[in-house]
Image (cartoon, grey):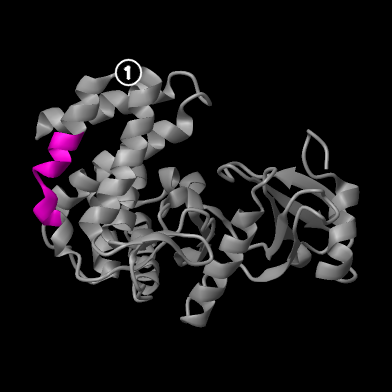
């Protein structure tokens, strides 16, 4: 492993066991990957291409988590996910934990959607709604962030989401000293806590369900989703977490996308507009924390979004 990423030689060594007989021709770093590095390993036979996800130092727990969540999904009949081929901890070939997965056919939906017709967008989002609805059939015993099990389980949706907000907004307060916005956000959520009780029971949540993590093929009959990736953020909680993130990150006011999502999901959600805004408040503070110190200018834009959300009531 080098500072430049996964080398062709390292990839070839890993594939000797994972994909016997594969001839590695190159390695391409994929866009995204969150806090991990994701690489497509190119083979002479494209059907043998794989994705290797490499985790940061002291982040072997992310490997264990992703294996656990992918296995849980497949055990419950969710097949539109990568196949797990092999992996290793920090004592393996790379000196860092890594996971080898099959390469799903197609590309991330956000690369194709800007050029799609309304009919194709509706089809794409109908399939996304069906897929996330299938994930949401997997019941969980409590609310909270998932590792290989639920960490710090909470008995109610309200307790869980207030804990998430306290952590994310507390980090904002510590970094900026902006107590005015911190208190305004807490008041915004406290005035709407009855919406948390609309969740009947916790389910498995992808927690990053948007076009960038949906792999799709564009066919003569329209877009076909081949799978969802990146389960690093998975948690147990309110299905609205996924739907509101999809709305905030990818739908962005598109009525066609929204209608397609709800059609696939099985219908519009009770009080969805108010619930989406409530959960967006929490998401935005989490998003600010992710980008803070990484992308100049981005955190300031997120804070303006938070202010706008509060002002809109």
Q: How many marks?
A: 1
Residue at position x 61%, y 66% in the image: 67
Front position in the image: 157 or 206: 157
Residue 93: percent from left, percent from top = 86, 54
Q: Is residue 86 above or below residue 251?
A: below
Q: Which residue is mark 1?
A: 177
Residue 112: percent from left, percent from top = 49, 48
In the displayed image of the protein, which residue is found farthest to the front? 152
Front position in the image: 180 or 214: 180
Left or right: residue 200 versus residue 173 is left
Locate residue 267: give its quadrant: bottom left
Residue at position x 89%, y 61% in the image: 23
Residue 98: percent from left, percent from top = 72, 55
Q: Is residue 189 magenta?
A: yes
State which quarter of the image contains the N terminus: top right
**Can the viewer see residue 79 in this picture?**
no
Q: Is residue 225 magenta?
A: no
Start and end of the magenta stretch?
A: 186-195
Residue 229: percent from left, percent from top = 54, 59
Locate residue 287: give its quadrant: top left
């Amino acid at each position: 492993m080098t500072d430049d990423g996964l080398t062709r030689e390292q990839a070839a060594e890993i594939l000797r066991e994972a994909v016997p007989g594969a001839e590695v021709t190159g390695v391409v770093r994929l866009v995204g990957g969150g806090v991990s590095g994701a690489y497509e390993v190119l083979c002479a036979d494209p059907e043998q291409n794989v994705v290797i996800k490499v985790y940061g130092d002291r982040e072997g727990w992310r490997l264990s988590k992703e294996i656990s969540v992918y296995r849980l999904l497949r055990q419950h009949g969710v097949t539109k996910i990568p196949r797990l081929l092999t992996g290793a901890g920090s004592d393996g070939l790379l000196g860092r934990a890594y996971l080898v997965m099959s390469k799903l056919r197609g590309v991330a939906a956000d690369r194709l959607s800007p050029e799609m017709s309304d009919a194709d967008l509706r089809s794409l989002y109908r399939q996304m709604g069906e897929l996330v609805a299938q994930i949401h059939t997997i019941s969980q015993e409590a609310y909270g962030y998932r590792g290989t099990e639920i960490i710090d389980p909470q008995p109610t949706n309200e307790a869980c989401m207030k804990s998430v907000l306290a952590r994310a907004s507390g980090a904002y307060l510590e970094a900026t000293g902006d107590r005015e916005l911190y208190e305004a956000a807490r008041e915004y959520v406290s005035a709407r806590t009855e919406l948390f009780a609309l969740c009947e029971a916790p389910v498995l949540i992808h927690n990053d369900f948007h076009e960038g993590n949906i792999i799709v093929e564009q066919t003569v009959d329209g877009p076909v989703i081949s799978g969802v990736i990146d389960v690093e953020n998975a948690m147990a909680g309110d299905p609205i977490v996924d739907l509101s993130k999809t709305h905030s990150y990818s739908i962005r006011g598109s009525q066609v996308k929204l209608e397609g999502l709800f059609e696939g999901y099985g219908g519009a959600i009770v009080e969805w507009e108010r619930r989406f805004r409530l959960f967006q408040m929490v998401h935005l503070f989490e998003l600010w924390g992710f980008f803070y110190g990484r992308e100049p200018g981005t955190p300031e834009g997120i804070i303006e979004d938070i202010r706008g959300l509060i002002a809109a009531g």
